[in-house]
Image (cartoon, helix red, strand yellow):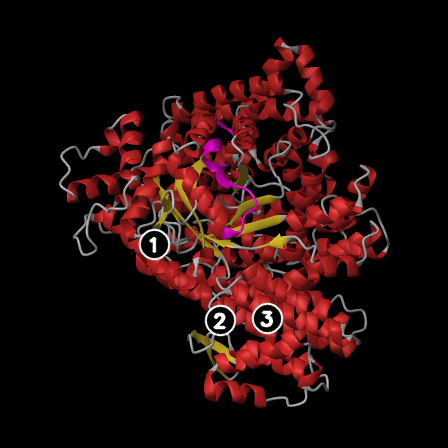
Amino acid sequence: MEPLFENAQGQLGKITGDLKYLLKLLQEVLTESGAKELAGHIPWIGGAGLPEKLTPEHLQLYSLVFQLVNMVEINAAVQQRRQDEEAGHKPEPGLWSAAFQRLKAAGIGQEEALDALRQIAVEPVLTAHPTEAKRTTVLEHHRELYLLLVQRENQMYNTREQEELSLEVKQSLYRLWKTGEIYLEKPDVASELRNVMHYLLEVFPELIDILDRRLERAAEQFGISRDVIARAHAYPRISFGDWVGGDRDGHPLVTAEVTRHTLRRLRLNAFVAIRRKLARLVRHLSFACPMEVLPEAARARVQQMAEELGPETGPQALARNKGEAFRQMANLMLVKLPVDTQRGHAVQLSEHPGSYFHSEELLDDLTLLQQALDAYGAAAVAYREVVQVKRVVEALGFHLAALDIRQNSAFHDKAVEQLLKAALVQDTAFSEWPESKRVAFLSKELESARPFTHANAELEEHARAVVDCYRALREHTGRYGINCLGTFIVSMTRSVSDLLVVYLLAREAGLTEMAPDGLVCTVPVAPLLETIDDLEQGQQILRGFLEHPFTKRSMAYLVQTRGWQRPRQQVMVGYSDSNKDGGIMASQWYLYKAQQRLARTGAELGTDILFFHGKGGSISRGSGPTAAFLEALPCGTLNSRIRLTEQGETIAQKYAYKLNAAYNLELLLAGTFARTVLDRQAPCENHPLEAILERLAQDSREHYAALLHTEGFIPFFRQATPIDAIESSKIGSRPAKRTGASTLNDLRAIPWVFAWSQARFHMTSWYGLGTALQALQEEKPEGYQALKAHCSTDPFLNYVLQNVDNSVAEAEEEVMAAYAELVEDHSIRSRFMALFREELQRVRAQLDALLGGTYAGRHPRHSHSRAMRATVLQPLHRHQIRLLKKWREAKKQEGADTLDLQTELMLSINAIAGAIGTTG
């Protein structure tokens, strides 16, 4: 065993013990499979050390090894939390216990806490961006192996049982070794939907009861009994959203038919999840109880349900379980689910006489059953087992996850131009009209319900794509209700007219209705503010939109039909493009300011602003510890509700394993609860360091922008990183570029960040900040000292600096320089490496001065983990550089077969992504 690995045991403890166990078994698997030489190259335990010349088999091996490292780190964290809770240690910040302790310290009463719990609503939204480099099959094998690793925690296993478990682990490792990790063909949207569906069906429904029990235990310490929470049904609302099959921004494969298929699949799998819960409830309600014992309302409903199911199905359902009235009632609910079943499993949607159409119908029946059980004396069953089913139905509805429809504002403009052309309007240059003319035209048009074209009109590409999509939505919502849809999201929202355009397009497809005071849109429309300029203009855009008569009418309609207590406007804020636009400090500060201003504008206009955070998997794109992220948000902007995206590899990192998934959702729920309640205790004010942070944001943005506009930057970026390999990869179904051009503006933020991280620059999460901090220190020393004094106490400042600190730790100058050698022009290479080295040194010195000590001293466990990984990462980087040279040379030769080189490159990208724990 390597000395480094032995030294790490003192700091990493259980992690190295579990990893050694898995690596030894992997060594046996490879040896028994005829790969004895390769087995000797397993890192840290192999004995033969790491070879300088790597083969595709080595890349696959190291990719697998790093997946095992990540797995044991997650398991160690889960087990440590369980031990800490068992020992009664101080609760981890951000969890329910810590949230209630904070409320108690602030003098919050029980009634106020209960009232706030009912109002909390969180919604993770799963997206498929081209960042998840592992196939769905591989993810499933990882989940299987993780469960075996958890079983190993069982101290009751004897020696024989431990040996049997080790054999199962070896079989699981063998499957992982023999399964190709990367996509050889680009996945389609259907395969990405299957991956997302796994979490929505197999993971999230199983977490709700775990989360509720943890809430109840924590509330008891606050003096609120479980019985009080259960009878008041004072549980926070959790629901889920989906972009796969709905997000068509730059994704031509997401057609109207794909969206139809997605909505059907989501509805079917909602019934699969609900049927599992109902079937379990039916099995448990085996009380000997004649029908006469049920309260009159329940008896009448049982008879009514049987009649609704028809003369054949109704009596058959009632004939089961005679003398067990509660079971009969629950079984009728099971039969009323609109699905066909085979061997007890739902296999396809099938409406039949008496079947449920809307989830509210089932919830009403479950409430009746609950009341009947309570009256019978079975309160424990009524408020535990029936509530479990109700909570799943409340979370999933009959749609599993709300499907958002996202499209770019420029695409909508082209669609309108094509509709105008089809309607024989003379001036069709809508995208070139000034804003005043656009708004005036849209306002006038929205006074009428008349569409531009008839249903069978031949439309050009953009108009046809939008109208066909909206008509598919109208068909589905007309039959099943509007809850299956989330929001129409307009990416690159630059003006009020960009939002009003959606209303016009909705009218064309019949997604509008005539209310008493005029035409309304049945689906909410939300801006996506992505760039820094858009964030700065957001307040003006929001005010103009909310004050528009059509928006006011539509908002009143939504309040009435969706049961909202107040008008509610969703605003999505983008972390990726604002970072790509201006660097980390500018992105974070302008996002902070924008949310503060938007919330105040909403309050002035009597509208609650629901922020939808478009966060990615890297610090550059908004990632960071959930508890700290919520604490860093501006005062008053949570307001009980939050939506946020879970993208790419973060879905698996957070939710692949049940207890870790529950932990991550608890952080979201409890953090939203605590911030909401505590923010209401005092008026919200501007940030105390506003002037200093504004200066830092501006200075860092200028320095970052200067880098991007320095002559030669694009050649440096395209040659010193594997961006071209990423663009040609088979990772996701979505194109890496928006339009196919090779400009910086056209490149999506995800591959932009992915490429810099592969070459270990990580510049998107630190460049510019060192210069800005140094200038502040030299020119405004009193401001610098004020900043330093707040570093550990101000949530926003601490969150940003801690995230930058972790990113800077991942930047490796030696590796950066090696990739820079790929740049053909020596002057360009030396110019940019000098800029990166100087800025990296500045930001490291500033972080040490502001946060105290060194990174290794601040984060000893992380430092040991990084050092351990580095021994394998260095040869991986060297190998990837050699592959890039060969692949790029081969591409220059006409007719050359580069497939094998490209596949090996993707293996290297996959291995490095697994090692550093992030892609884009």
Foreground: disc 3 or disc 1: 3
Front-most of 767 and 358? 358
What residue would you read off at disc 1? Answer: 254
Camera-side residue of 701 and 261: 261
**Which amino acid lies under the numbered mark 3 shown in the image of this protein?**
Asp
Q: CA distance from mark 3 to mark 1?
A: 38 Å
Asked if 584 appears above or below 50 in the picture, the reply is: above
Secondary structure under the numbered disc 3 in the rendered image: helix
Residue at image mark 3: 365
- Residue 56 shown left or right of residue 747 in the figure: right
Could you tell me residue 313's position as x and y percent? 48, 86
Residue 303, percent from left and from top? 57, 81
Asked if the residues shown at circle 1 and circle 2 are in contact, with their CB atoms under 8 angstroms apart, the answer is no
Q: Would you place residue 50 above or below residue 438 in this image? A: below
Q: Considering the numbered disc 1 on the image, is that residue within a helix, a strand or a loop?
A: loop
Tell me if mark 1 has few (under 14), some (14-19) or many (20+) residues whose alpha carbon lies within 10 angstroms of its own. many
